[in-house]
């Protein structure tokens, strides 16, 4: 899929898939929300607003209050690509989120996911 098409995917359409992935691996929606808020700087209320809006991924990340400074510590492979080597900043943020959700689904401790 071309990057510009990925950027136009609505966050509200992806969020239920993220919840389903987490819950299918016995993780909670609250843990998922905490990870998203940690990465993006959204408050719970801000995240709920984004879920209820029609924002695409480009807008979701553009409106994010502050990407966590420890996001650069996120390393690994998503969809066969090392997240730390992605050149497009927006695509890298999207893949950071994917990587964090993968770690949650794989049972990694929340403190480790949040790079503490």
Image: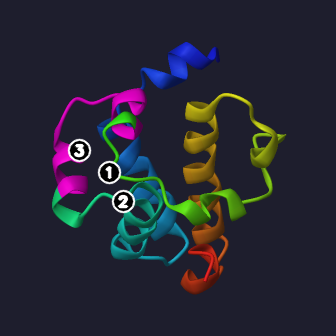
The residues tagged by marks 2 and 1 sit, at their Cα atoms, a distance apart of 5 Å
| Marked residue nearer the N-terminal end (3 or 1) | 3
Q: In the image, which disc is placed on residue 41?
A: 2
The N terminus sits in image quarter: top right
* Viewer-side residue, 63 vs 51: 63
The residues tagged by marks 3 and 2 sit, at their Cα atoms, a distance apart of 12 Å
Rate crowding at label 2 as few (under 14), some (14 to 19) or many (20 or more) other CA atoms within 10 Å: some
Q: Is residue 55 magenta?
A: yes
Q: SS for tag 2?
A: loop
* Viewer-side residue, 40 vs 30: 40
| Marked residue nearer the N-terminal end (2 or 1) | 2
Rate crowding at label 1 as few (under 14), some (14 to 19) or many (20 or more) other CA atoms within 10 Å: some
Side of 45 relative to 74 (left or right): left
**Does 52 sit above or below residue 36?**
above
Q: Main secondary structure of the magenta part?
A: helix
> Which residue is pictured at 60% across the width and 59% down the height?
71
Say which residue label 3 marks.
50
* Viewer-side residue, 65 vs 24: 65
The residues tagged by marks 3 and 1 sit, at their Cα atoms, a distance apart of 12 Å
Q: Position of residue 80 (x, y in %)?
A: 83, 40
Q: Position of residue 46 (x, y in %)?
A: 20, 54
Q: SS for tag 3?
A: helix
Rendering colour mode: rainbow
Which of the two marks, 3 or 2, is nearer to us in this view? Answer: 2
Region rendered in magenta:
46-61
| Marked residue nearer the N-terminal end (3 or 2) | 2
Q: In the image, which disc is placed on residue 65?
A: 1
């Amino acid at each position: 899929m071309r990057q510009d098409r990925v950027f136009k995917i609505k966050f509200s359409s992806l969020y239920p898939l993220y919840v389903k992935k987490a819950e299918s691996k016995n993780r909670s929606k609250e843990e998922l929300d905490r990870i998203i808020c940690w990465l993006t700087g959204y408050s719970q209320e801000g995240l709920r607003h984004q879920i209820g809006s029609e924002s695409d991924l480009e807008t979701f990340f553009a409106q994010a209050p502050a990407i966590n400074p420890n996001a650069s510590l996120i390393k690994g492979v998503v969809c066969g690509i090392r997240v730390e080597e992605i050149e497009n900043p927006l695509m890298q943020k999207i893949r950071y989120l994917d990587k964090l959700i993968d770690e949650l689904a794989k049972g990694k401790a929340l403190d480790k996911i949040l790079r503490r």
